[in-house]
Structures are given as structure tokens and as C-alpha cells.
Image (tube, grey):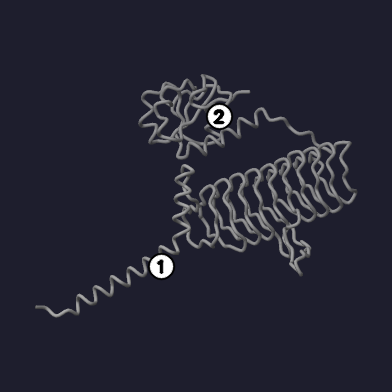
Amino acid sequence: MSTRLGELVERLGGRLIGNADIEVVGIAPLSDADASHITFLSNPKFRAQAAQTRAAALILSAADDEVVGASYSGARIVVSNPYAYFAHAAQFFATLTARVAPTGIHPTAAVDSQAQVAANASIGSHVTIEAGAIVEDDCVIGAGSFIGADARVGSGTRFYPRVTFLAGCEIGKRGIIHSGAVIGADGFGFANEGGMWIKIPQTGAVKIGDDVEIGANTSIDRGALADTVIEDGVKLDNQIQIGHNCHIGAHTAMAGCVGVAGSAIIGKHCTFGGAAMVLGHLTIADNVHISSGSMVSRSIHEKGQYTGFYPLAKNADWEKSAVIVRNLPTMREKIRELEKTIKALSANESEEPNE
């Protein structure tokens, strides 16, 4: 299916320079696009490639248009944020070819008579929905998923196949949970008694806001007493662990394999690179950005970029550095002794009479 450039701009905004009646079928990279595609330029270092692209139209900023516009032969859509515009356009083209899930409950699904499922929801094969659960309008629940007792799934939310959404958990509107995710497993809570571990019942739940996306095989643990909270607009990649009683602020994003220990409080609009780790009971302010592989071992109260890992090096060089780090306490004491000696010598020189 195709759409006119003029229709796309009417829908998404932007300033169109060129023929509004050109038909395009989708978006492609600068190098692969042809006369049936639009493409985008979001990084100035690709200006030369953009000038040569065969795409029917190019999404770009006003600054890039001043450089590329004269040499590019196609239509241009000038916007303030080309990458965000590309994302909106990609969503639009996806709707043109998206397969619509059938409404209703599959014959193999097991839905408790005390559950509430909207008539226009789509419940896939072998889904289980327990008593008291609520599935609102336009939800799509993929095959083999589980929704526990008294859980709530907000309108327009989609579960891909094999999502586990346990008792009492809630997610708001327009959410997306990918396959293998487990929401509401017990938090890791134990008390030590004489060398043995005594389980602490995890009686809280997980409360998730609107427009949240949760990646494949990600786990979010229920709270011990209070709830684990994921605010609106949070984006979690695959294979992330969120511990019990954590609170993740709105529009925070985490890349794959991030781990957040229990009771950490993370602010709004934060980002975490892949494999970053956050220790428990810490507080992180709004607009904090953690580099990949970093270990957050203390609370952060000021916004900014934080990095906490030793740069990659050849193994032999790393071993030499490790020896130096191990000897730092001894070196510090030697430096202190040298400082005292220098200070004493300086004092003696200043006390000597002038000839």
C-alpha cells in the first residue's frame, strides 16, 4: 500500500518542498532507498550520502537542507527533529500493512467466569485469564500468555505470546510486553536466621503506567509490602531485571541486560546503557544518564552523564594497572610520609638565620 507525500505531511506536519502527489510505500535507509521510498538524514556526517540517495523524498533538518537541498533531486520534508519524524512515519507505514488481530476469545483459551474481558479484545490460543482479572478494550493477548487473578490490562495494550502477568499486577493504556517477560514474580526477599534463609512473603504488586514497553525475557518483581512502580512512558529493553519495590520514573529508558536491585528509586527521563547495574536502596535524580557497563554504587543527586568502568585495554596492560591499583593504599602512605618530610625540611630552611 502507498501514500501521497502530501497526505503524509498533512498527517505528521513538516514543510514539504517538491511534488505532493508522489506516491511512496515506506521508509528505507539512505543507501537502499529507491523511487518508491522516503528516507531520512539525522546525522550531518551522512550529508554526502543523502545528496546521492535515490529516494523519492528526504526527511531532514533546516540546517541540513541548506547543505543538501541544492544537490538532492527529490522532494524534501524539512522538520526540526528528523529522527523523531522518521519514527512517526514508520509507525504510519506499519499501520498500512499490519495484520489485525481477530476479536474474541480463542476456543482453547481458559477464561475464568469471574474475569472481565472486553468484547473487542483479542485473546489468543491457550491463554489463561484467572478470576477477577480485567482486560480492557482493544487489548491483544498473544498465545500462551497468562494473566493472574485480579490483574488489570489497560485499553490498547498488547501482550506478545508467552507473557506472564501475575496476580494483582496492573498495566495502563497502550502498553507493549514482549514474549517471555515475567511481571510480578516474587522479589528476592529473605531473612537470615542461624545461617538459613527465611522467605519473606512478597505481598505487593507491580503497577505499570501508560505507554510503557517491556522487552523480551525482562523480569519485574512484585514488591515485598508496597508495590513496584513503573511510571508512564518507560521503555525497557530485553533481559532486564527490576527488583522488588523499585520505582522507575516516567520516560526513563534502559538498554538490554540492565539490572536494578530492590528499592532503588530512579528519576524521570533517565537513560541506562546496556549492562549497567544499580545497587539497591539508591536514589537517582531526574535526567541522569548512565554509560554502558557502569556500576552505580551510590545515590546520584545531580543530573548529567555518569560513567563507572575501567577502559578496555590489552590484558597485559590491564594486569599492570591492576597491580598499581592494589598498591594504592601503600603508595598513599608513602606519599603522606614524603609530604611530612618535605614540610619539615621547608620549615627548617625557613628557620635558619640569614648570613
Q: Nearer the viewer, residue 39 or 345?
A: 345
Q: Is residue 206 above or below residue 335?
A: above
User: Residue 328 vs residue 157: left or right?
Assistant: left
At 54% from the left edge and 20% from the top edge, which residue is drawn? 36
- Location of residue 245 with respect to 36 vertically, above or below: below
139 over 64 or under it: above or below: below
Q: Quadrant of the C terminus?
A: bottom left
> At x 45% / y 64%, what residue is drawn?
329
Q: 162 above or below 297?
A: above
Residue 60: image quadrant is top left
Q: In front: mark 2 or mark 1?
A: 1
**Amino acid of disc 2:** Glu
Mark 1 element type: helix
- Can you tell which mark lies on residue 216? none
Percent coordinates x, y for residue 104 in the rendering: 83, 38
Circle 1: residue type: Glu
Q: Residue furthest right?
A: 113
The answer to whether marks 2 and 1 mark residues whose Cβ atoms lie closer than 8 Å is no
**Residue to which mark 2 is pinned:** 7
> Which quadrant: the N terminus?
top right
Q: Residue furthest left?
A: 355
Where residue 25 appears, x then y in whole percent? 58, 23
Q: Tell me the tag on residue 333.
A: 1
188 or 216: nearer the eye?
A: 188
Residue 230: x, y in percent? 65, 54
Residue at x 78% of width, y 52% of height = 166
Dot 2 lies on which element? helix
- Residue 221 in which image quadrant: bottom right
Badge 1 local density, few (<14 within 10 Å), some, or many (20+)? few
Question: Label 2: few (<14), some or many (≥20) within 10 Å?
Answer: some
